């Protein structure tokens, strides 16, 4: 556990540090009594707040570096802040590298959003290598650039973000 010295805001300070400052003082063993004795000298226990809930896709929790007095208790808290554009882009790139689904899941997602017939009709007119990949793949990977190409060929064209949404939906299909 840590303490703050409230007269000057020094933090963090351990119980051992306080005892070293007062070498000729015998502090109680009982935690509550010891904290009271420390408080008489300006040292107050700091409680660490639990990390708050947040959506890691859009936000992050940042731990405070100095405690604040909250409802009479010195607390080391958190802030929830929005991710920067750079962090969002890095997260999206990392997600695209690992996102996969089965062809069945992908087709069910397309069916849900009324795109299955359109995509199958389009694929039927593409080179044989593309048709073979579409028909016989065991696992579909979002990182494959063919998805963005296929999306751009659709009418209306689908953006990379639209393709991400299809993969996200597909990944929810059991």
Image: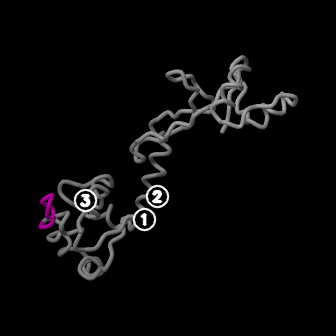
Q: Identify the magenta region.
A: 111-117
Alpha carbon of mark 3 to alpha carbon of mark 2: how far?
Answer: 18 Å
Q: Nearer the viewer, residue 104 or 5?
A: 5
Residue assigned mark 3: 169
Secondary structure under the numbered disc 1 in the rendered image: helix
C-beta proximity under 8 Å, tags 2 and 1:
yes
- Please give the name of the residue rendered at 23% of the width and 80% of the height, measured from the top-left corner: 135
Residue assigned mark 2: 94
Q: Residue furthest right?
A: 24
Q: Residue 59: give x, y in percent of width and height.
A: 43, 41
Residue assigned mark 1: 98
The answer to whether any part of residue 152 appears in the image is no
Q: Is residue 24 above or below residue 143?
A: above
Q: Quadrant of residue 173?
A: bottom left
Compared across the picture, whether 100 is left or right of 172 comes to right
Badge 1: how crowded within 10 Å, few (<14), some, or many (20+)? few
Q: Residue 147: give x, y in percent of width and height.
A: 32, 65
């Amino acid at each position: 556990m840590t303490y703050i010295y409230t007269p000057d805001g020094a933090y963090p300070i351990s119980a051992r540090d306080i005892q070293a400052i007062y070498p000729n003082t015998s502090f109680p063993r009982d935690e509550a009594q010891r904290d009271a004795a420390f408080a008489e000298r300006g040292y107050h226990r700091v409680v660490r707040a639990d990390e708050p809930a947040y959506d890691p896709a859009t936000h992050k929790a940042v731990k405070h570096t100095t405690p604040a007095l909250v409802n009479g208790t010195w607390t080391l808290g958190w802030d929830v802040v929005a991710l920067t554009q750079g962090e969002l882009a890095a997260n999206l790139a990392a997600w695209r590298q690992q996102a996969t689904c089965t062809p069945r899941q992908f087709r069910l997602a397309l069916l849900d959003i009324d795109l299955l017939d359109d995509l199958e009709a389009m694929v039927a007119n593409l080179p044989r290598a593309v048709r073979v990949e579409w028909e016989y793949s065991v696992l579909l990977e979002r990182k494959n650039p063919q998805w963005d190409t296929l999306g751009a060929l659709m009418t209306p064209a689908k953006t990379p973000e639209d393709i991400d949404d299809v993969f996200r939906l597909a990944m929810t299909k059991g």
